[in-house]
Image (spheres, rainbow, N blue to C red):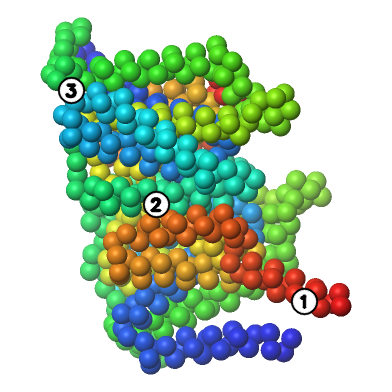
């Protein structure tokens, strides 16, 4: 394999890794703080993608979608948390899963009402169409843009969690919610905020992924399972873990189609199982941050 | 107490008589419901009685289904041979997967079963030369059932319904004996306090594994019944959403009472089949009902009724 093909495959892997990371970081953040495994997280991703289709269709401009769609998802997430999740924090995990599964079904049919069962597509903005030259490799501009946004999101989350007062509150609540409450942190408010951020990230991932793939129903159930695998591999509740999981899965997806076509996804689950067996807490610990 | 099982006998008589007054469309529906009841109750042996939430039980359902279908299609069209092979394959798969999974607890157990379940799904989906890939197995034959002395024609839906009813009834009877045996009691102890059991020298993992294999065996039987019933199967029966179904059926009915998941299955299937007959948008109703159920009736429907009745009985004792 020449260097340029290798490099192109590597960049493909990095592009999907970044969309994976953005959605998985939201999922793992929500789990780390709220201790809820949100099956409807993939549905927020799907909503983000469908909003992108709709907004680019109306305005003919991807940038509106990039700004508006994640916000709408965040609002949807905040409503979800306030109305449905708040009463179930004390219930056993199976009931929380049942509830978020119900939300997943609900959102899937709402999407079906508005957009039907047809495949949809969204186009990237004109500035980002076409290819550019990196190290002698001609590579789509839009993919580079996705990688850059992914890196920015990564830095943003890192600063948010480690450098701000809000981040300190998140970390405090994730390690011990009762003590955090006792220290005067408004935990219910924090939960809503974290869920909103998670939903925003899921929506953002959906927007970024929209021009790269066909937008359709059933994106939700496939995406959530990939996000689960990443989060489990990296460690439930760990953001750096989600990053590592995403980078691994991205490259596996990219080079897997080259060397182990058809079974690359099976490898992901094998890897997930091995990690769970030898390090149930994932590659990187438990703490958020 | 003599009348305790009267309602059960009445139910069995009713189930035997149904083909006399139900249309063949409803018989198809009822047959599928019986299969899903077996799926849910055998899943609940692990969930309600042993306290382990599996998110990968579609693996055993689909292995039972695919192996039975493949034997019928390519090896020899014999129902007993195909069913035994399918169910044994599911039990072996459960033994291998369970061997690893019983080492973990709670959410990690759920995630590991999910990973194995999706592994099985990917293999079924991608190994298209054997399994037909995304198209699945089509034209699965439903040969006559050859028992030593007589032959039963299974081609009509009513006869397949009776065949399913007999197998499901036997399977549930065996499961009922298991949960009421000393072994079943031990499983409940594993659920309640596995740490303490370990201290008194009981091999918790072994109990969990046996429960896992029994559960996988009967899920395999449910799957085996499913193939010749629909005559075609697709990889969607191995996808994680299929694994989620028995979880929700058990929770809907109640996990602590043996037959309660059956009630959950009836409700789930009713919603799925009947509502989808009226409108494309059945998921919105099912979703809303699941949400409402978690928010207002988290003990399960039968658990809720049971609590009410028991409360009344206790009240009477108090007087």
Q: Are marks 1 and 3 in contact (CB under 8 Å)?
A: no
Toward the right, the furthest residue is B319
How many numbered marks, from 0 up?
Answer: 3
Question: Secondary structure beneath disc 1?
Answer: helix
- Mark found first going from the N terminus, 2 or 3: 2
Decide if residue A275 is in sight here: no
Gap in Å between the C-alphas at discs 2 and 3? 31 Å
Q: Is residue A150 visible?
A: yes
- Choose between B195 and A96: the one closer to the eye: A96
**Lateral position of residue A199 relative to residue A113, left or right:** right
The image quarter containing residue B229 is bottom left
The answer for how far apart the CA atoms under marks 2 and 1 are is 39 Å
Q: Disc 1 to disc 3, how far (Cα)? A: 70 Å
Which is more toward the observer, B276 or A226?
Answer: B276
Q: Is residue A80 left or right of residue A51?
A: right
Callout 3: SS: loop
Residue placed under numbered mark 3 in the picture? A125
Please tell me if label 2 and label 1 are on a single chain: no
Q: Which image quadrant for residue B313? A: bottom right
Relative vertical location of residue B153 with respect to residue A159 in this rendering, above or below: below
Please determine if labels 2 and 3 lie on a single subunit.
yes
Q: Tell me if B7 is positioned left or right of A2 in this view.
A: right
* Chain letter for mark 2: A
SS class, disc 2: helix
**Residue under pointer 2:** A106
Q: Residues within 10 Å of mark 1 (few under 14, many from 20)?
A: few
Position of residue B194 in the picture relative to residue A220 (left or right): right
Q: Is residue A65 above or below residue B173?
A: above
The residue labelled by disc 1 is: B313
Image spot of residue A90 (x, y percent): 65, 45
Relative to the observer, which residue lies in front, B78 or A127?
A127
Query: In the picture shown, does residue A124 fall above or below B6?
Result: above
């Amino acid at each position: 394999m020449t260097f340029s093909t290798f490099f192109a495959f590597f960049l493909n892997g990095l592009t999907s890794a970044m969309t994976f990371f953005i959605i998985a970081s939201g999922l793992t953040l929500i789990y780390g703080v709220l201790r809820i495994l949100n099956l409807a997280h993939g549905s927020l991703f799907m909503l983000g993608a469908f909003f992108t289709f709709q907004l680019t269709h109306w305005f003919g401009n991807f940038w509106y979608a990039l700004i508006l769609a994640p916000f709408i998802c965040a609002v949807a997430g905040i409503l979800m948390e306030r109305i449905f999740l708040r009463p179930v924090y004390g219930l056993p995990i199976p009931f929380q899963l049942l509830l978020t599964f119900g939300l997943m079904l609900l959102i899937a049919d709402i999407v079906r009402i508005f957009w039907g069962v047809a495949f949809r597509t969204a186009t990237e903005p004109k500035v980002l169409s076409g290819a550019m030259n990196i190290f002698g490799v001609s590579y789509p501009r839009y993919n580079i843009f996705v990688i850059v946004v992914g890196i920015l999101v990564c830095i943003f989350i890192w600063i948010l969690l480690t450098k701000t007062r809000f981040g300190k509150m998140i970390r405090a609540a994730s390690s011990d919610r009762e003590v955090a409450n006792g220290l005067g942190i408004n935990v219910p408010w924090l939960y809503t905020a974290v869920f909103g951020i998670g939903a925003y990230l899921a929506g953002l991932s959906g927007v970024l992924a929209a021009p790269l793939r066909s937008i359709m129903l059933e994106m939700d159930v496939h995406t959530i399972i990939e996000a689960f695998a990443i989060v489990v591999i990296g460690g439930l509740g760990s953001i750096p873990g989600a990053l590592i999981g995403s980078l691994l899965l991205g490259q596996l997806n990219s080079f897997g189609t080259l060397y182990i076509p058809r079974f690359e996804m099976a490898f992901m689950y094998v890897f997930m199982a091995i990690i769970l067996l030898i390090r149930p807490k994932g590659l990187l610990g438990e703490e958020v941050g | 107490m003599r009348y305790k099982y009267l309602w059960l006998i009445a139910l069995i008589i009713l189930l035997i008589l149904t083909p006399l007054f139900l249309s063949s469309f409803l018989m198809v529906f009822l047959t599928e419901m019986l299969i899903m009841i077996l799926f849910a109750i055998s899943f609940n042996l692990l969930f309600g009685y042993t306290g382990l939430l599996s998110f990968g039980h579609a693996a055993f359902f689909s292995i039972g289904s695919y192996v039975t279908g493949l034997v019928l299609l390519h090896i020899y069209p014999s129902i007993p041979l195909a069913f035994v092979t399918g169910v044994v394959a599911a039990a072996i798969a459960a033994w291998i997967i369970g061997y690893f999974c019983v080492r973990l607890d709670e959410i990690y157990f759920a995630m590991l079963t999910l990973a194995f379940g999706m592994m099985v799904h990917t293999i079924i989906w991608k190994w298209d030369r054997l399994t037909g890939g995304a198209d699945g197995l089509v034209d699965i034959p439903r040969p006559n059932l050859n028992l030593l002395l007589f032959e039963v024609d299974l081609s009509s839906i009513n006869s397949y319904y009776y065949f399913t009813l007999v197998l499901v009834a036997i399977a549930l009877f065996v499961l009922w004996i298991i949960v009421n045996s000393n072994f079943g009691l031990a499983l409940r102890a594993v659920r309640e306090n596995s740490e303490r059991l370990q201290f008194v020298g009981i091999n918790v993992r072994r109990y969990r594994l046996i429960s896992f294999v029994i559960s996988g065996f009967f899920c395999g039987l449910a799957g085996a019944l499913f193939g010749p019933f629909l005559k075609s199967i697709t990889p969607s029966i191995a996808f994680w959403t299929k694994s989620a179904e028995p979880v929700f059926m058990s929770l809907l009915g109640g996990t602590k009472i043996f037959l309660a998941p059956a009630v959950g299955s009836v409700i789930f299937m009713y919603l799925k089949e009947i509502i989808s007959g009226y409108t494309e948008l059945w998921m919105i109703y099912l979703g809303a009902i699941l949400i409402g159920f978690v928010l207002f009736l988290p003990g399960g429907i039968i658990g809720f009724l049971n609590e009410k009745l028991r409360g009344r009985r206790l009240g009477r004792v108090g007087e």
